[in-house]
C-alpha cells in the first residue's frame, strides 16, 4: 500500500509539470505554510487582536477578554520556550523579553499594542519554524520510503522478512511498484527505478542485470531479483538518515556566536530597562507612566529578534534547496564554510574519472591480425576478475568476436596473466621499456601512450611480441565543465591522486586542472590538503574511496561522491553529492556564497534598524505601535530574505 501510494504521488507529481499552472510548487509551499501549526496560532492571535480592536468602542471589558485570548494563543508557545531556557540554561532569551514587553504594555492600558507585538512576534517565529521544518522535510524526504519488509528467495520459495534482517549475499525479489529493501546488485530482471529520494534525479533510471540499486528507491514496471550487498545498517539509505540527524545538530559559527551573545544582550536590555524605570523619573523629571512607556518601547525595539533570525532561515533554506538537487549537507556549519572555499582538490579515479577502465587502443605487431590478437587476449583474460581484464573482454564482445576456451590460465602477480588458447601460449602483462626483445615500433608506441596517460600492456604469443593494448580510465563527461565553472567563481581546482604522475597530468590537462599531485599515498593527500589550506585559505576535497577519507577529514569541507562512494568516505565527508554530478560542486559553492551574502545583509539591516529605533525612542520618542512594527517588521523581513533561497 505504501509503495502504491508513493508511486501514485510520483505519477501525480510528474503529470502536474505538464499543466498550465504557472507555478504549482510555489502555490503548494504557500498552502503548506498556511496549514503550519505555529502559523495557524499566529493568524488566530491576529484575528483576535483585530476583533478586540473592533469591539473596543462598544465594550472595553469584552475587548480586553479578546486581547487576553490573543495573548494566550500567540504567546503561549514563546512563553513556554522562554521559561524552559530560563530554567534549563539559567539564561534569558528574546522570547521572555517579548512576552515581558507585551505584558508591560497591557499593564499600562496598551492592550492593542501588546497584542500586536505578540501577533507579529508569533508570525516571525512561525516563518522561522516553517523554514527549519521545510529544510528537514526536503533533506529527509526519503525517510518516508524506509523499507520495512522484503521478499527473500529461499530454497522453499519466497519468504517475507524484515528488511533489517537481510544480510549480504541474500537474494530478494522486488515486485513492480515496490520499494527496494536494500543496497544490492540486480542478478535478474530489468526495470526503471525512481531514485530521486537518494540521488535527486527526477527521471527514473533504467536498470538491468549487474546494475547497482539502493535501498529506499522505488522499482518501476518490472520485477527484479537483487543480491544484497550491504546489511541494513550499512546501506546508503541508512547513512543518509544518519547525516540528516547530524545536520539537525550542526549550526554555523555565526549562529553560535549570536546565540552566545543573545543571553548577554538580553540581560543587558533588562538591566537598561530596569535602570530607566528607577532613574529616569529623577534624572529627567518624567512621570511614572511616561517612564514606563519609554521603558516598554525600549524593551521592544532593543530586543535582538531580527539579529537572532538573520542566520538560520537563510542557511536552512540553502540546505533545503541543495537537498532537492541531490546535495546533502551534514549541517549548516558546512554551508557557511563552503562559502569561503578558494580551492577544490579532486581525487582522480572514481571522482574525475568514471572509475571503469576501457580499451583505448590495440596495436598489432607486424605480421599479426588485430582481431585475432584481441580475441586471444579476451579469451585469456575472461576468467580474471581484474578491472583491466574485464575491459578487454568487454571490448572483444563489443566487436562481436568469438572467444575460445582458455586452458592453464595463471595470474602473474604484479605483471599480468598467461593462458593457453587453441594450443598457443598467450601472455598479457605490464609493458617493460627495458626489455631488449621489445620491437622498436612497439617501444615507441608504448612510450607515447604512457605519456598520454594510458595503461599499456604488452601481448606475447609463444614468446614473440604480438602487440600492445592500451587502457584508460575515462574522464567523466562533466568534469571539464565542472572545473570551468569553478574557475568562473574564482576557485582553483587541484588533483590529488595515487595514480602515476604521467597519467595524472594527462587527465588533469583534459579536465583543465593546473595543480596536479600524483603518486600519493593517503597520508600524502592529507599533507597536500594542509598545504593547500595554508596557501589558499579554506579548501574543499572531493573524493570517493577509502584512501580519500583522511583527506576528506583534513579539508575545510569534505565532499564525497554518493554514487558508489565508499562507506568511509561517506562517513567522514561533510557534504555528499548523491548523484555524483561534479557540476553540483560549483553550483553549491555559488549557493553557499549567496547564502553568506544574505546573512550579512540581514545582520547589517537588523543592527541598523535596532540602533535607529533605540536612538529614535530617546531622541524624539517612538509610539509603541511604531516600535512594534519597526522591530518585528525587520524580523519578518530578514526571515523572508533568507527564505528566498528556497527558490
Image: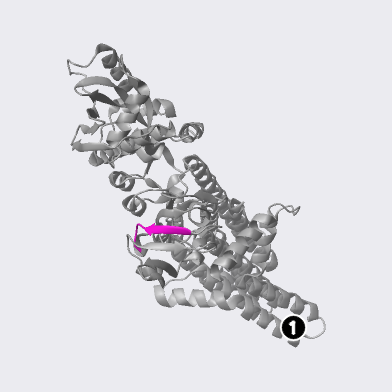
Residue at 46% across, 53% down: 328
Q: Is residue 433 above or below residue 415?
A: above
Under circle 1, the secondary element is helix
Instruction: Give left or right: position of 529 versus 577.
Output: left
Percent x, y of residue 578: 46, 50
Residue range highlighted in magenta: 224-231
Measured from the top left, where is residue 265 in percent x and y?
47, 63
Q: Check if residue 226 falls in the magenta segment.
A: yes
Vertical relation: 509 (above or below) 72: above
Q: Residue at x 49, y 69 (%)?
A: 93
Residue furthest top in the image: 440
Query: Residue 390, position in %: x, y?
Result: 34, 38
Query: Residue farthest to the front?
Result: 423
Front residue of this view, candidates 124 and 501: 501
Q: Looking at the image, which residue is at 27% across and 20% down?
A: 466
Give the residue at mark 1.
Answer: 63
- The question of residue 148 being in magenta is answered with no
Badge 1 crowding class, 10 Å Cα cut-off, few under 14, some 14 to 19, many 20 or more, is: many
Left or right of 60: which side holds 311? Answer: left
What main secondary structure does the magenta stretch of the protein show? strand
* Number of numbered labels in the structure image: 1
Q: Quadrant of residue 89?
A: bottom left
Q: Is residue 286 visible?
A: no
What colouring style does the render use? one colour
Residue drawn at x 43%, y 68% as measured from the top left = 150
Residue 402: name its quadrant.
top left
| Depth check, front residue: 479 or 467 | 467
Could you tell whether 434 is left or right of 30 in the image?
left
Judging depth in this view, the residue of 56 and 227 nearest the camera is 227
The answer to whether residue 463 shows anywhere in this view is: yes
Amino acid at each position: 500500500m505504501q509503495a502504491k501510494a508513493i508511486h501514485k504521488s510520483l505519477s501525480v507529481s510528474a503529470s502536474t509539470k505538464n499543466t498550465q499552472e504557472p507555478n504549482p510548487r510555489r502555490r503548494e509551499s504557500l498552502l503548506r505554510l498556511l496549514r503550519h501549526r505555529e502559523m495557524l496560532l499566529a493568524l488566530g492571535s491576529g484575528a483576535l487582536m483585530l476583533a478586540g480592536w473592533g469591539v473596543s468602542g462598544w465594550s472595553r471589558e469584552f475587548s480586553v477578554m479578546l486581547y487576553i485570548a490573543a495573548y494566550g494563543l500567540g504567546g503561549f508557545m514563546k512563553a513556554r520556550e522562554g521559561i524552559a531556557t530560563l530554567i534549563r540554561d539559567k539564561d534569558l532569551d528574546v522570547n521572555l523579553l517579548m512576552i515581558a514587553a507585551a505584558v508591560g504594555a497591557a499593564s499600562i492600558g496598551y492592550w492593542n499594542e501588546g497584542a500586536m507585538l505578540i501577533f507579529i512576534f508569533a508570525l516571525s517565529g512561525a516563518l522561522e519554524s516553517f523554514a527549519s521544518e521545510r529544510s528537514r522535510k526536503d533533506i529527509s524526504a526519503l525517510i518516508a520510503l524506509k523499507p520495512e519488509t522484503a521478499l527473500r528467495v529461499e530454497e522453499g520459495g519466497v519468504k517475507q522478512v524484515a528488511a533489517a534482517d537481510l544480510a549480504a549475499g541474500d537474494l530478494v525479489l522486488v515486485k513492480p511498484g515496490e520499494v527496494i529493501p536494500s543496497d544490492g546488485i540486480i542478478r535478474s530482471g530489468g526495470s526503471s527505478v525512481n531514485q530521486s529520494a537518494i540521488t535527486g534525479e527526477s527521471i527514473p533510471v533504467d536498470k538491468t542485470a549487474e546494475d547497482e540499486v539502493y535501498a529506499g528507491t522505488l522499482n518501476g514496471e518490472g520485477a527484479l531479483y537483487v543480491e544484497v550487498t550491504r546489511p541494513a545498517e550499512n546501506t546508503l539509505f541508512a547513512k543518509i538518515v544518519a547525516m540528516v540527524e547530524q545536520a539537525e545538530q550542526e549550526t554555523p559559527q555565526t549562529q553560535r556566536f549570536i546565540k552566545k551573545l543573545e543571553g548577554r544582550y538580553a540581560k543587558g536590555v533588562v538591566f537598561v530597562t530596569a535602570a530607566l524605570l528607577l532613574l529616569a523619573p529623577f534624572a529627567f523629571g518624567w512621570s511614572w507612566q511616561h517612564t514606563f512607556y519609554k521603558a516598554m518601547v525600549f524593551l521592544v525595539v532593543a530586543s535582538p529578534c531580527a539579529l537572532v533570525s538573520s542566520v538560520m532561515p537563510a542557511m536552512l533554506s540553502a540546505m533545503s534547496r541543495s537537498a532537492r538537487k541531490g546535495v546533502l549537507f551534514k549541517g549548516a556549519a558546512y554551508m557557511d564554510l563552503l562559502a569561503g572555499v578558494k580551492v577544490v582538490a579532486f581525487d582522480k579515479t572514481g571522482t574525475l574519472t568514471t572509475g571503469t577502465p576501457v580499451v583505448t587502443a590495440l596495436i598489432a605487431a607486424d605480421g599479426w591480425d588485430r582481431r585475432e590478437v584481441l580475441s586471444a587476449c579476451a579469451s585469456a583474460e575472461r576468467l580474471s576478475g581484474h578491472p583491466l581484464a574485464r575491459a578487454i573482454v568487454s571490448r572483444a564482445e563489443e566487436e562481436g568476436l568469438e572467444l575460445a576456451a582458455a586452458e592453464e590460465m595463471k595470474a602473474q602477480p604484479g605483471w599480468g596473466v598467461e593462458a593457453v588458447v587453441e594450443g598457443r601460449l598467450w601472455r598479457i602483462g605490464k609493458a617493460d621499456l627495458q626489455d631488449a626483445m621489445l620491437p622498436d615500433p612497439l617501444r615507441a608506441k608504448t612510450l607515447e601512450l604512457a605519456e598520454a596517460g594510458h595503461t599499456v600492456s604488452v601481448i606475447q604469443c609463444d614468446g614473440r611480441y604480438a602487440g600492445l593494448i592500451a587502457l584508460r580510465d575515462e574522464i567523466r563527461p562533466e568534469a571539464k565543465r565542472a572545473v570551468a565553472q569553478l574557475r568562473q567563481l574564482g576557485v582553483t581546482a587541484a588533483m590529488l591522486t595515487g595514480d602515476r604522475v604521467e597519467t595524472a597530468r594527462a587527465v588533469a590537462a583534459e579536465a583543465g586542472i593546473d595543480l596536479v599531485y600524483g603518486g600519493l599515498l593517503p597520508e600524502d593527500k592529507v599533507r597536500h590538503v594542509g598545504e593547500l589550506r595554508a596557501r589558499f585559505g579554506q579548501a574543499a576535497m572531493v573524493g570517493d574511496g577509502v584512501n580519500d577519507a583522511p583527506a576528506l577529514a583534513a579539508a575545510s569541507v569534505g565532499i564525497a561522491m554518493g554514487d558508489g562512494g565508499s562507506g568511509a568516505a561517506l562517513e567522514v565527508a561533510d557534504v555528499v553529492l548523491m548523484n555524483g554530478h561534479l557540476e553540483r560542486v560549483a553550483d553549491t559553492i555559488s549557493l553557499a556564497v549567496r547564502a553568506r551574502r544574505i546573512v550579512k545583509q540581514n545582520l547589517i539591516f537588523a543592527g541598523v534598524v535596532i540602533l535607529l529605533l533605540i536612538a529614535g525612542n530617546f531622541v524624539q520618542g517612538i509610539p509603541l505601535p511604531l516600535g512594534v512594527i519597526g522591530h518585528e517588521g525587520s524580523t519578518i523581513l530578514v526571515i523572508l530574505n533568507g527564505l528566498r533561497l528556497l527558490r
